[in-house]
Image (spheres, rainbow, N blue to C red):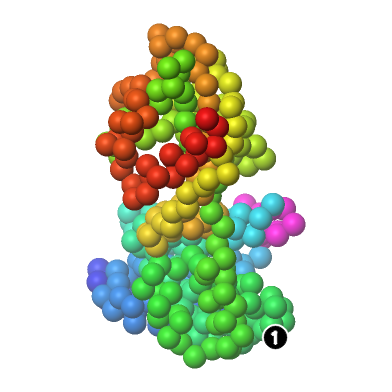
Amino acid sequence: MGNIPNNQKISSLKKTLEDIMAPTKELAHGAETLQWLLKIKPNSDWQIQISAFAHDIERAVPFVEGKYPPKPEKDDHNSYDSYKQAHALRSAEIVGIIMKDQHFLDSDIAKVYSAIKNHEIGGDTDSDLVRNADSIRWFDKGYIKYIEKSGLNGAKEKGWWMFKRANKETKELILSLTFDESIKQYIKNNVSDLPYRQGVYGLLLNDIDQILLVFKRNSKMWDFPGGGVDKNESLEQAIKREILEELGTSNISIVGISSVTNKYDWPEKEMEKNFNKTGIWKRDQEQHFIILRFLGTDNEIKLQEEELLESKWVDKEDLQKYMSYPDQYDTVSKALTEFK
C-alpha cells in the first residue's frame, strides 16, 4: 500500500482484518473494493486503502459485550438508508477499536473511522472514494451473488441504490461495464424518474398590488419568499410557515394556488449534496406559486436576517428587471394572471 509510514505495522493491521473477514465473503468483498479504489485513485493514502478493504467488516464480527457494539437490524430502522448508515458506523467502530489496540496514532484512526462511517453516502473526498469503489465493485462482481440471494428484482433495486449514490464519473464508469442487461436498463429508466423536491413561493401582494421581493444573503439575488415543503405538509401550510419564518408575520390570506409550476434540474453535484444532507435523492425542485394578500402594515415585516438582507415592494411592470432565472418572469406573470 502507498504512502505507508510504517510498512510492518500496516501489514500487521491488514493481516488482522484479513483473519477476521476470512471465514466470510467479506474478505473477497473488501479485496475487490480495494482493487477498484486503486484503479480510480492509484496513489490513495494508506488509511483510505484500509477503509476500502474493511468498510463492511461488521458483517463478519459478532456482538461481543464490552468490546464490539451490537449488530444493526433492518427491522429497527425506518429506511434502508438509515440501516446502511448504522451498518457503516459499526464497521467504523470495529476498525477503530482494532487500530487503537495496535497503538495507531489518533489522527490515523480518525481518518479511517470517518471514511468508513460515511462510505455509504460520501460527503468528503475520502468517503467518496470508498463509496465509489464499493459501487463499482457491486456492478463488476457483486450483482451476481445478489441475484442468487435476492432474485433479479431485488438486484435491480439494490443496483439502483448503488448507482444513484455514486458521483457522475463513477456512474459513467458503471454504465460502461458489462453486467446484467435488465439491471442496466432498470437504472437507465430510473434516472429519468427521480422525483422533484417540492417548493413553494409566495407572490405576496399589498393593497396596491405591488409584489414583495426579498434579497437572499447566500445567492445575492432578488427572489420571492418561500422554500421547501416539509414531509406531511400541504402547500398552504408550507407557505404560511415560510412567510412566518422569513418575514416574521402571519398576517396574510391565501388568494389561490396557481396551476403554473416551474421545474429545475440540479447538476449532479447538487443532487449528491442534497442526498448527503437528507438521505433522499431528488432531481431538484418543482416550484408551486401561491398568490397571497398581505393584510398588515410594513412595520410588521421582520426579516430572517440569517437568510435575507432586505425586502422591497415592486410594481408588476418593474418585476422583470429583478428576475434571475430563465423564463422566471413569464412563469410568474402566468401565475398572477390566474387570479386577477
Main SS, magenta residues:
loop
* Quarter of the view holding residue 208: top left
**Quarter residue 250 falls in:** top right
The percent position of residue 5, horizontal first and vertical second, equals 25, 68
Looking at this view, name the residue that lies furthest to the bottom.
Answer: 178
Q: Position of residue 265 (x, y in %)?
A: 43, 57
Q: Nearer the viewer, residue 291 or 303?
A: 291
Segment tinted magenta in the rendering:
63-77
Q: Which residue is mark 1?
A: 148
Q: Is residue 298 visible?
A: yes
Q: Nearer the viewer, residue 41 or 29?
A: 41
Tag count = 1
In the rendering, at what x and y percent does residue 159 appear?
58, 75
Q: Is residue 299 above or below residue 120?
A: above
Front-most of residues 216 and 336: 336
Let me know if residue 71 is in the magenta part.
yes
Above-or-below relation of 16 to 215: below
Q: Does 99 sit above or below residue 134?
A: above
Residue 325, given in percent of the width and then of the height, sits at: 33, 47
Identify the residue at image location x=52%, y=14%. Answer: 295
> Which quarter of the rendering shows the N terminus?
bottom left
Q: Secondary structure at mark 1?
A: helix
**Which residue is painted at 50% across and 85% down in the image?**
140
Residue at the image point whose x is 46% and y is 87% from the top: 177
Please tell me which residue is depicted at 40% across the width and 67% down the height of the picture.
Answer: 167
Q: Name the residue type under label 1.
A: Glu
Q: Is residue 304 visible?
A: no
Q: Residues within 10 Å of mark 1 (few under 14, many from 20)?
A: few
Residue 251 appears left or right of 316: right
Q: Quick check: is 30 in the magenta stretch? A: no
